[in-house]
Every structure is written in C-alpha cells, then in structure tokens.
C-alpha cells in the first residue's frame, strides 16, 4: 500500500499552519501537514501493541490510519490532531463533570474544569443539585447564592485558562426545569457579553413538563436539597419565557432528559444529566469521548453512494477511535477510569449537504429525510459490527455488565455521535456536519508572498460544475452569488438547480428540525445542530420548533434567529448624550462585538477595492476599505481612510458629509468602473458608499468573524467562521 499525499486546499493549509502544526519556542512552524498526520497515525497505531501486535503489524496499521486521514475520508477531532505525541497529549474533545451541593464539591468541580480546559477539552455541567438562592446553609447560618452565581465562578475560570495557548474552553450549563432558580437561569444571558459568555445554556426538560405545556397544566418546582415542592407554576408560562429569551438571544436551548435516558446504554451508572458544550455527547459524570467524522462527499462516486467504501471507512474509523482511548493522556484520574470503563467513541459525519448536492437531492425534501435515516442506520450498524469484532479480539468494555450490552462482546458502550466539525470540515474541504451549506460563495483574505494580502473567493465546487455544464457560468453569476450567498429568486437559473442548491436560510425551520430528528433515529448519542431561523421568525416559530423537536425524538435543540444577538447589543450601553469628552466634544460610540454589513467590489487603477459598510441600528457605523493588490503604502493609505471614516461615523458625522469630502478627489490614474469614471481611491470609496446607501436591493446582513472579518455561521450549537476556522467551541 502506497502512502497517499494529501490534497489540502489553500485555505486548509492556512488553517493547519495557524492552529495545528507544531511550532518551536519562537513560534515558527516546524511541521508539515504530512508530518502532522504521521504524528497522529503513529501514536494511534502504537495502541495495537497493547493487544499483541508485532512491529510489522503496527507499521501496517500506521499506514492505514495515515491514508484514512490523508485521503480526507475521515478526520479525528481537533484535540487529536493538535495534541498527539505532544506535551499535552490529551486527545478527547468533550467531558462532563459533576457539581455537588457542598462548597467543597463545587470548588472541586471548578478545579477539575481548569484542568480539563488546560488540556484542551470542553466541559458540560448540570447545576440542578445546587440549592436555590436564599436557601439555608446550616454550616454557616447563612443563605445560598444559587446555581447561577456559581456558574459565574466557572465562567471566570474558563476566561483565565487558555487551552494550550490556542483558545479558551467552552461550557454547557444545564438547569432542570423544576429547579426554583429556573427563571433566573433562563434570563442569565439576557445582557449579551455581560454574563456567562463562555457558556452555552440549556434548560433540562422532562416529558411531563412538555406535555403540561401542551395541556396548559401546572408543574411542580422542587427544592433539590429537601425534595419538597416549593411552588407550582403554569408550564406554558415558563415555556414562553424560555422561547422568548431564545428568540431574543439564542439562549437557552432545551435538553430533553427523558428522551436521553430512554437511549441510555449504561443505565447501571445512573441517569444522564448533562451534555458536552455543543450538546452532541450525553455523558455520565467524569465521562469523556473522542470524536471523529467521515467525509460523506468522498463516499459518492458517479452520482451514487459507494456503500462498500463507506462500510470499510466506518470499520477502520471505529478501530482508530478505540485506539485513541488507549494512548490518550487524561486530565483527571476519574475521567480515565470512566472513559476506559465505558470506552465511548463518537463516530460522526461531515459533508452531508454537499453529498446531497452531488446526489441532486434538495435538503428540505422527504427524499433527503429518507436518505438520512437509511445512511445513518447503515453507519450505526456498521460501527456496531466493527465494535463487536474488536470486542472479540480485545474483550468487551469493562462496564458492560452495567449496560444494555450485557452478554455481548461489544467493545464500546456507544459508537456514533454527530459532532461539530467546523474546523475539520474546512480542512477536509467539505460542509460541516449535517448542517446545510451556509453560503455558496465566500470572500477570504490570503497572503501573496510574505507581505501582500489578497482577497480570494471560495465558490461551491458543485454549483460551479453544474453552472458550467448548464451554460450559466460567468463573472456576473459569480458576483451575484458572492453578494447574496444564495441563488434563490434568480430566474435565469433553472428551477431544478435552484431547488437543489439551497443554503441554510433558504430552508424553513421545521426542515432543520426534521433533518436533525431523522439522523437522531440512528445515532446512539446525540446530534449537534443549530436550527437557523430568519430574522422575521416569530416567538411562536421558536416555540413550534422546540415542541416539534421533542415530539420527533431529538435529544436537544438549539435555535438561532438571524441577527438576534445584534439586537440585544442595542439594549446595552450609555445614551448618546452621555458619549462626550470632558471638553464637550462627541465621544465615539463603542463598537459592539457583532455588526451587520455588506461589501461591494469596485475597480480602481490600483486593483479591486473591497468596500464594506457595517451598520448599527440601521445606520452607517463603520467602513473597511481594502485593496486586492497594490503596493504596501497604497494599501495602508486605503485602510487609513476607512478608519477615519469609521471614527467620523461613530462620532455622529453624517455619511453624506463624508461622501461630499471624498467625492471628486483627483488622482494620477483614473479608471472606469460601474459605468462611471473613478478618479482616485478616495473617489472610489465615496462612490462606493453612495451606491451602498442608495441600493434598493435587499442586502443579507451578517455577523463578522473577529479574526478575519468573514461571515460567521451559527451552527452545530456554536459559532464558527467558515473561512479561518475561528470557533467558540470547536
């Protein structure tokens, strides 16, 4: 068997260099992508020695694992790629930690959190065991401050502990719907970026509660310390508070605990109460799971699924992930014990949306739902067969007598999970998880040589192929797709093409929920997905999605209404009249973390000018101006103009005055663009801003990546950049 040379895209190589490849003490990259894959495959294959493999056999498995990754048919989760054969050595992505009610138990959990985050993992908690705010604390004759206050301690811990110098960790915080502090919890993230910014939060709901929401009945609230009923509430009123807050901010989600525990493969360890940060891995206390995903796009050949290749890929991936458990360096002894006792693995998928493009199947169709069930059942069954075969070779997992698999030779208590693949799907060059494609074209920045930055366009390769075959490929088509990200409503494109090439916001919310439920039927763990909704979605739409998810058997649900977090920012801050320096002159408004905007390309004598106008509350707020190619000084001057315009706008200067100052400034090399003469860079900026302001075309407002300025995606329970790989969770 020959060693495959991986074919990474330019963007994938940039991401690998930025986040994954080894560096020396001075920060210089000292590893190639191929060497990274060798590093991972050598460590994972070394586990074969624990089961009697010879050196020759270990070498053979190393080559198989290397080619599995180099072909981009499968990739493990980011911690495995980053940490294999390195100092941290922690290869798992997700953990669940218990939080008891005593001060000692709470701060033990805080310490454990710091250790897990330091090692590169994310953590999930259920805080429902903590006594409510105002409850008695007999040891001090005081009163309890409640779970939300202690969540802030965990949040601060996360804030100050960076993961291997690369990122901060992510958390999931769950509070059960029958806890006395549930209303405070629901509102905990109402002031965006003020509280719990390192947490996703979800309400732990039970079937009884959901049924009483439908029946408009009353629900008992229990003190977790005494188990006594402290009050009754109207289930529908509490549910309405949940969905209202989710409509406003995206939090809280919901976790359906009874659904989770009906599928609990380890009932002997007790009920499952929590998930990892993005909700796809439901685990017992001190549980962890290493994850990996199969690239479905590579399982399609000549417009058909290659089921034989898929089965072989599943079997090899299961062995890979089982080996990872044996070579992992665990952050806590308790985690090592539970992980090796259960041997949970999480084999998932990526590239579902692009597989559908290849198969000519619309995402929002019954055909797609049927295929999702068939595909995931095939993968789950194949993974179970591979696990049982490993069990016959190596023995079953130690806790098997506490599981539903008692009497079998199953090697792993759980085998399938659909996890976030935000960054590894970029490395693999495909779409993320089971999410729809977010946009059919992206603009990204890249370096040309060592210093000059250029702007490149990534265009969906399946759409490009179809457009060329069907005769509607041209530069105008590319620009149109780049501007909107979608092809819906463009009558020049054949209707059957538009029907297949839908993107996330072309798809009605109920189809997002149905797709999640279709996969969940044959996933042993859970499915990480965000139900994206348009800005015009109502509170009732959110309520319908939550109820539908419960009825269809989803284990949890996360929604995001487009631009909801931007609206929330407007509620925070001082009034305009208070934004003054001591001398009475205007003080520039502070920039929120997220703004909406749109970009226009203009031709100049110095290269293409990319002009981005961002707005706050519907008014011009800042301008970014960059040149696609030019000399260093010209690029710097252009950027400086953008910064000064932004300062003027944030200080209350009308955009019209800015345009009047710049328009008509002459230069040495005038050119022709958009049907008029462009005299200079300042003149181009003025005319571009004027065109953006006068545009009658509905613009797609977006959230921008803080690292590279690209459009952020709310998907898989997290926020991810499709260009540079920035993520709050992955």
Image (cartoon, helix red, strand yellow):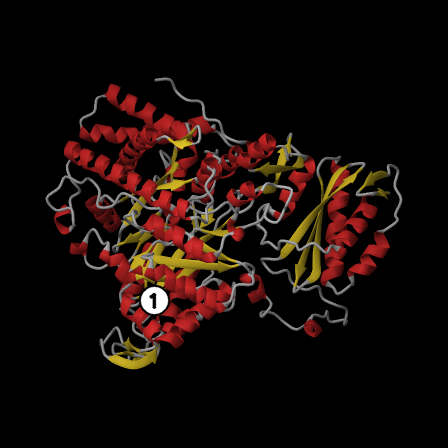
Left or right of residue 439: residue 288: left
- How far from the left and from the top, in percent, is residue 474? 67, 34
Which residue sits furthest left? 407
Q: Is residue 298 visible?
A: yes
Label 1 Cα crowd, 10 Å radius (few <14 / some 14-19 / many 20+): many
**Residue 684 place in picture, x, y as percent:** 80, 46
652 lies above or below 634: below
Identify the residue at image location x=35%, y=63%: 174
Residue picked out by circle 1: 175
Q: Classify the position of the N terminus by image quarter.
A: top left
Image position, residue 507 (x, y; %):
50, 52
Is residue 347 in view from this perspective? Answer: no
* Residue closest to the eye, 250 or 372: 372
- Left or right relative to 702: residue 519: left
Front residue of 78/541: it is: 541
- Relative to 719, 592 lies left or right: right
Which residue sits at x=61%, y=70%? 573
Determine the residue positioned at 66% across, 36% down.
Answer: 454
* 251 or 695: nearer the viewer: 695
């Amino acid at each position: 068997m020959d060693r495959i040379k991986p074919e990474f895209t330019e963007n994938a190589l940039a991401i690998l260099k930025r986040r994954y490849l080894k560096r020396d003490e001075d920060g210089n990259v000292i590893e190639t992508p191929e060497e990274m894959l060798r590093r991972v495959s050598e460590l994972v294959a070394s586990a074969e020695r624990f089961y009697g493999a010879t050196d020759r056999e270990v070498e053979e498995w190393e080559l198989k694992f290397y080619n599995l990754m180099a072909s981009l048919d499968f990739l493990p989760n980011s911690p495995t790629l980053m940490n294999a054969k390195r100092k941290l050595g922690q290869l798992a992505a997700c953990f669940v930690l218990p939080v008891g009610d005593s001060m000692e138990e709470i701060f033990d959990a805080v310490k454990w959190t710091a250790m897990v985050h330091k090692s590169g993992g994310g953590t999930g908690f259920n805080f429902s065991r903590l006594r409510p705010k105002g409850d008695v604390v007999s040891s001090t004759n005081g009163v309890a401050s409640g779970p939300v206050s202690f969540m802030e301690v965990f949040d601060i811990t996360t804030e100050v502990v960076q993961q291997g110098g690369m990122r901060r960790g992510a958390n999931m915080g769950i509070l059960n719907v029958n806890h006395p502090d549930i209303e405070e919890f629901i509102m905990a993230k109402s002031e965006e970026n003020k509280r719990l910014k390192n947490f996703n939060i979800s309400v732990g709901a039970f079937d009884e509660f959901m049924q009483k929401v439908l029946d408009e009945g009353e629900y008992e609230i229990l003190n977790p310390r005494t188990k006594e009923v402290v009050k009754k509430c109207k289930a529908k009123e509490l549910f309405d508070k949940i969905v209202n807050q989710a409509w406003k901010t995206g939090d809280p989600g919901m976790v359906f605990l009874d659904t989770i525990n009906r599928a609990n493969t380890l009932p002997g360890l007790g009920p499952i109460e929590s998930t990892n940060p993005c909700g796809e891995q439901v685990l017992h206390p001190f549980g962890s799971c290493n994850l990996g995903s199969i690239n479905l796009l590579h399982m399609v050949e000549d417009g058909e699924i290659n089921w034989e290749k898929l089965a072989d890929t599943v079997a090899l991936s299961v062995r890979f992930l089982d080996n990872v458990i044996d070579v992992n360096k665990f952050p806590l002894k308790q985690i090592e014990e539970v992980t090796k006792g259960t041997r949970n693995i999480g084999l998932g998928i990526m590239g579902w949306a692009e597989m559908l493009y290849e198969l000519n199947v619309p995402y929002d169709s019954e055909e797609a739902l049927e295929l999702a069930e068939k595909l995931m059942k095939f993968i789950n069954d194949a993974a179970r067969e591979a696990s049982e075969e490993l069990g016959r070779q190596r023995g079953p997992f130690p806790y098997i007598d506490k599981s539903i698999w008692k009497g079998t030779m199953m090697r792993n208590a759980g085998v399938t999970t659909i996890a976030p693949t935000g960054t590894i799907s970029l490395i693999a060059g495909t779409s993320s998880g089971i999410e729809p494609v977010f946009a059919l074209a992206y603009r990204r920045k890249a370096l040309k040589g060592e210093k000059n930055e250029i702007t490149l366009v990534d265009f969906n390769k399946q759409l490009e192929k179809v457009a060329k075959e069907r005769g509607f490929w041209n530069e105008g088509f590319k620009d149109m797709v780049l501007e909107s990200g979608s092809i819906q409503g463009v009558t020049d494109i054949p209707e059957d093409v538009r029907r297949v090439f839908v993107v996330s916001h072309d798809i009605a919310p109920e189809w997002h929920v149905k797709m999640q439920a279709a996969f969940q039927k044959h996933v042993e763990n859970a499915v990480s997905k965000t139900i994206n909704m348009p800005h015009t979605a109502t509170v009732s739409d959110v309520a319908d999605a939550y109820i539908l998810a419960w009825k269809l058997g989803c284990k949890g649900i996360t929604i995001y209404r487009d631009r909801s977090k931007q609206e929330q920012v407007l509620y925070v801050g001082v009034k305009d009249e208070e934004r003054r320096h001591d001398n009475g002159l205007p003080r520039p408004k502070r920039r929120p973390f997220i703004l909406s905007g749109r970009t226009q390309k203009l031709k100049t004598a110095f290269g293409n000018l990319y002009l981005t106008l961002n707005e706050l509350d519907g008014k011009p707020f800042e301008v970014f101006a960059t040149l696609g190619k030019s000399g260093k000084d010209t690029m710097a001057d252009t950027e400086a103009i953008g910064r000064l315009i932004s300062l003027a706008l944030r200080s209350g200067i009308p955009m019209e005055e800015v345009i009047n100052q710049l328009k008509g400034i002459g230069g040495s090399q005038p050119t022709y663009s958009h049907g008029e003469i462009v005299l200079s860079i300042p003149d181009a900026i003025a005319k571009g801003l004027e065109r953006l302001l006068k545009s009658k075309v509905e613009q797609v407002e977006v959230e921008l990546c803080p690292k590279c300025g690209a459009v952020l995606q709310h998907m898989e329970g997290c926020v991810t950049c499709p260009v540079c790989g920035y993520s709050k969770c992955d």
